[in-house]
Amino acid sequence: MKLWVPPESDFYYDTNWYIDNFGTSLRMQKLLITADNVLDPHVIHLLSNITNEVSSIQIHYNNRTYSKNDLCFKVPVVAFVSPNWKARSEVLVKSNNSQSKLKHDGYDIDYYDPSLLVDNDFYCSFIESFSHSCYQDSIVDIWKNDEMLIKNLTKSDIIKNVNEVKINPVTGHSVDYTKQLGGVERDENGLIVSAKSVLITWYMYVNMSEVDLNEVGNLVGTEDWVTVPLAMWEKKYLKYVSNLSSPKNIKFFYETGGSFADISGETMFNDMDKLSIGIMLMFFYVVMAVSRFNWLEIRLTLGGVGLLSVGMAYITTVGWCSLIGIPFGPVHSSLPFLLMGLGVDDMFVMNACWKIVLQSESHRSIPVKVGHMLKHAGVSIVITSFTDIVALLIGAITILPSLKSFCIYAAVGVFFIFCYSVTFFVAVFTIDIKRIRDKRNGIIFCYKHNNDVNVSSKTTFFQKILESFYKNIVFTIPGKATVILFVLIVTGVNIAAVLKLEQKFDQKWFIPDDTYYKQFLNTHEHYYPDEGYPAMVFLGDMDYYKEFNNLYNMIQVLRNESYVTDVVTWVETFHGYVLKNFNHNLLNSSSITEGQFLNYLSRFIYSGVGGRFQVNFKFSGPHACGKTIDNIRATTLSFRFTSFKGPQEYIPAMNHVKDIVKSASIATGDGYRSVWSKAFANWVTDEIIAVEVERNIELALLCVMLCTVILITNLQMCLWIFICVLLTIVNVLGGMQQWGMTVDIVCCIGLELAIGLCVDYAAHVGHTFLTMTQGDRGERAYNTVTSIGSAVLLGGGSTFLSLSLLSMSKAYTFQSFFKIFLLVILFGLFNGLLFLPVVLSLIGPAPYKSRDENVLEAIELNGKTPDNKKMLAKRVES
C-alpha cells in the first residue's frame, strides 16, 4: 500500500483506521474447479475429499503445530435448530415486503427468532456450549461435509439442495450457494440445473499486531499483511493444490492470499539473468564502438571501465537511497537496464570530442588534450545530465509513492554516473591514451609494439556512410522537405491518438500470463464476470441509538444506486428482527428507549438471524451473550460494487458512494464514516494518474527549457531543443495509444525518464552546432552531425541494446519500459539527428563568439601555471 497509494488519500487513512480499530484482517485462499458439470456426484465427492485434506494441512513454527483450524477466521455457530426449518425461513419470493420481511437484493428474509421462546439465561448457556467454526464458502457445507452422506447423493439431490438451501447447516448463517457456481444453466423456472465451475474460499485470520514484514515481506514491497505461521501454511497449501491430479475434464485453478506478492516479487528478479546477458552484449557493443581494428586501439579496458562506472553508480544509488529510507519498489529492478543505457552515452561523447581534439591540437600534451576534450564534451555532458536530473526530480514531487521513489533513485543514479564519468572514467581514459602513445598492446599491456603498428587516423566506414547520407540525401532540398513534411504528418497522426489515450492501472498486470495466479484470475473473470468488488462502509464512534434512522436512510439511498449490489447490513436486518419479534419500529425513536435498543441488539448478534454480523462490530470492552451492549467502538456495513468497464465508470461510482455516506446526517460521536474497498487502491491511482502525468510532463518540459537556457545561453537554440523534446513526447504518447497501452504508474515513470533521454539527443546536436564557427548554416549543420552524430547514434543504440532484452521479459514493468523507450529512441533520434539539423541548416542561430585562436589558455599543470606569452613566442618561433 505504501508504494502505490498516496498517503494523503482517503484509502490510506481509512485502511489505517480499520487496522487501529479492528486490528484484524481476512486473508482468502481460493480453489476454483471447472468441469462439464460440477453438480455431478463425483465432482462433489472430489470437493469433499479436497476440503478434508486442506483441513489436515499442518505446519510447525516455534515448537508449535498449526492447522487450518488454528489459523482460520472463526464465526459463531448459531445452527441450533433444524436445518429444514432454516431452509424454509429464507426463500426466494416475488412478493413485496411485509411487516416481518425485508428484501435484500432478490430474496426475502424471515426474521422470526424461535429462541426468544426460551429464557435468556438458558439460551445464552446453550449458545456458549457451541464452538466457533471456520468461516468458509464451500458447497459441501450443505451436507456438513459428511462423507457417507455425500457418497449417497444423486444428481437430483444435489440440484435440489443447491437451489433450496439458504442457511449454512454448519454455522446457521444465511448463505446463497448459487453464487459459488459459475457458467450456470437454468430451467424455465429459473432454477439451476448445471454449472461449469464451483469456487471454494477459505477465510484465514490475521492479527495485525503479530505481523512482522521483516520476516514475511519481499524485496519489491508488494507484500500483504500476514503472520509467519499463516505464510508458512499458505506455502504448504499452495504445494498441495498445485500437485492435485486432474481427473478427466476437471481442472483446478487456485490462489493464496500471498499469490500476488510472491509472483510479482519473483517476476521482477527472475529477469536478472537478462541483466547479465545485457552487460555482456553492452560490453562488446561499447568495445566495438570505441576501438579500431589494430592491436593498439582494442580498448577492452576502457569499455569495461565505462560499464563499471554504471555499476558503481547503481550500487551507490541503492546504498545511499536505502540509507536515508527511500523505499525500493517493484519497478526499481529495471533501474540497472535504464542506467546502463543512459550511462555509456557520456563515453561516446567524450570519444567523439577526443577525435576532434586530435585533429586540431595534436601537438599538445596528453593532459592538455584531455582538458580540451572535457572543455567540449564536458559542457554537453553537464547539460544532458543536469536536465535529466531536473526532469526526474520534477517527477519526484508526485503524490504517488512508487513514482516518487523511482524518480529519486533514477535522479541519484544519473548524478553518480556523471560523477564517475568525469572522474574515474576520465582518469582511465587518460591512462589508456598514454598506453596507445607508448604503443602498448591493447590486451597485454606489458608488450610494446615496434613502429610497424600505427594508430589509425582514417575515417571509419560507418563515418563515411554517415557523411554520405547527410550530404547526398538529408541536406538536399528534397531531403529537407521530406523530413519536415514527415514530422508534420506523423505528429498530426499522433496528436489524434493522444486524444484517445486512456488512463487505467491494474496491479494484475504485474502477473505474467503463464503463472498459476494469472490463470486463476482469467478463469475467475470468465465464470464470475458479475461478481463485482466487495466494499464496506466504516462507521466510527457514535450514538447508534440516536443515529439509527439516519443510518437506515443512508443505506436505502445506497441500495438504490445502480452500481451497488448485495447490500446486506446489520442495520436493516436488526430493524426487521426487532419489528418481527418485538413489534417495535426502530425508525420511530419514540417507540423504543435506548436501553431497549441496546438489549435487543445484544440478543440480535447472538441469534440465528444476526449472529453472522458479530464480525461487523468492534467493542471497546468485552461483551457476551446476555449482557447489554453499551460500548460500540466501530461497525462496518458490507456491500458490493457491480462490474465496471473502466475508470470512466468506477471512479464516479466510488466518489458518489463516498458522497452518499459523508452526506448522511450524523451529528454524534466523532462523526467518522467512510467507504472502503480493496479495489480503491487501484481506483485512487487511476483517479489522479492522468493529472499527475500531465502536470509532471509540463513541469519537466518547463524546467528543461530553463536549464537549457542557463547552460546553452542561446535562446533560439533552446527553443528548438524544446520543440524537439515536445515533438518526441507527443509522438511517444501517440505511439503508446496505437500500441494498446494506457497511462498508468509504470508508463508515468517511463515518460519521466523519456523527457531526460530525448533532451540528450537534441542538446548534444544543438550545443555542438553553436561551437561550429566555420562556414554558413548548412556547413555548420553538416559538420555538427558528422562530428557528434555518430556519438548520439551510438548512444541511442546502446540504450536500445540495454533495453532490448526487456522485450523478452514476462514482467509488465519491463515490457512497458521497452515499448516506451523504443518509441523514445526512434522519435528522439529522428528529431535530434534529422529534424533539428535540417531546421538549423535553414534558420539556425549564430555560433558562440570564439576567442583568438593564437591566445593560449592558461592551464594549470602540476601546480604551475605556464606563461602564455612565452609559450606563444616558442610556438611562433617553431
Image (cartoon, helix red, strand yellow):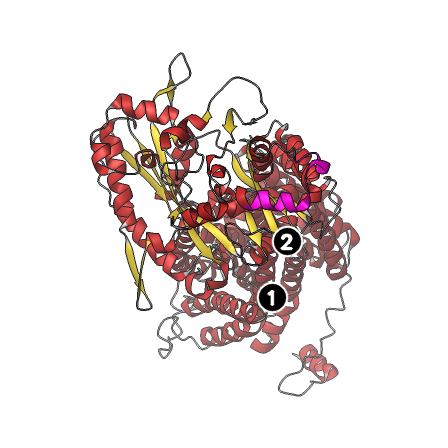
Left or right relative to 495: residue 216: left
Per the rendering, the mark at residue 415 is 1
| Front residue (pair 131, 435) | 131
Cα–Cα span, label 1 and label 2: 35 Å
- Label 2's element? helix
State yes or no: residue 587 in magenta.
Answer: yes
Q: Position of residue 844 (x, y in %)?
A: 74, 48
* Number of residues whose C-alpha sits closer than 10 Å to that of mark 2, classed few (under 14), some (14–19) or many (20 or more): few
Can residue 183 be seen by looking at this rendering? no
| Numbered range of the magenta stretch | 586-602
Q: Helix or strand or loop: what does disc 1 sit on?
A: helix
Q: Is residue 14 shown in magenta?
A: no
The residue lying at 52 percent from left, 50 percent from top is 626
The picture places residue 374, in percent across and down from the top left corner, at 62, 69
Q: How many marks?
A: 2
Q: Is residue 598 visible?
A: yes
Mark 2 = which residue?
Answer: 13
